[in-house]
Image (tube, grey):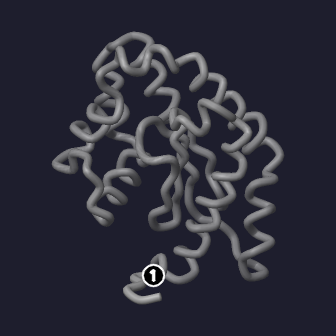
Amino acid sequence: MGLVYNFDFAELAISFIETGDTKYLKKLSELNAADHILNHALRFNYDVPTDSKLSLVTHLLTPISKYKEILPQVVKNLDYAKKHITNCHTVEKAVLDFLPKGFSFSGSIFFTWGYDIGVAFGNNCSLNLAHPIFLKNMSELKYYAVHELHHAGFIALKGHMPSFEISTR
């Protein structure tokens, strides 16, 4: 299958912020990216609604007035990600250099809006195009993509992320 670069969440989120039409929230809640975010939130006890994907995406994207101002930069970040992360596959190639020879991805990298800076869960990872770090410097998207994709590769190999519960020095 290989690595899938999935922009559906970011594109629908942009449409929602532009129009305010709640039909986009329903469409967002039906995406694999919404499953990814919800599963991560449930597993790691994030302080977001977890009773349904619709309540989660509504929480991430409202109030709209809060996000109208950053919308143009998020659109630029989306364009940057499409041109500089997916087209040349440099991120994937960089990560594969640090995973066992012969490893191949079988998940997605979701480009989202509103949830953490980026997370990995299962074989997938995501990047929040509306995160303040990316709003300030969109080239950081490449570095965080490498970071999160490496986590996804590690999880695919090991089945989980290691827990570093350090209680002493």
Q: Which is nearer the eye, 58 or 66? A: 66
Q: Position of residue 57 (x, y in %)?
A: 31, 36
Q: Position of residue 18 (x, y in %)?
A: 44, 12
Residue 80 lies in quadrant:
top right
Could you tell me the amino acid type at mark 1? Phe
Residue drawn at point x = 26 percent, y = 43 percent: 53
Q: Which residue is mark 1?
A: 164
Q: Position of residue 149 (x, y in %)?
A: 62, 61
Residue drawn at point x = 55 percent, y = 46 percent: 127
Residue 1 in sight in this render = no
Compared with 113, 90 (above or below) is: below
Classify mark 1: residues with Cα within 10 Å, few (<14), some (14-19) or many (20+): few
Q: Is residue 14 left or right of residue 139?
A: left
**Residue placed farthest to the bottom in the image?**
168
Residue 94 lies in quadrant:
bottom right
Q: Which is nearer the eye, 78 or 105? A: 78
**Residue placed farthest to the front in the image?**
169
Compared with 130, 140 (above or below) is: below
**Residue placed farthest to the left in the image?**
51
Q: Is residue 130 left or right of residue 19?
A: right
Tell me the element at label 1.
loop
Q: Is residue 131 left or right of residue 38?
A: right
Compared with 68, 10 (above or below) is: below
* Quadrant where the N terminus is found in the figure: bottom right
Residue drawn at point x = 63 percent, y = 46 percent: 5
Residue drawn at point x = 52 percent, y = 66 percent: 123
Q: Is residue 42 left or right of residue 103?
A: left
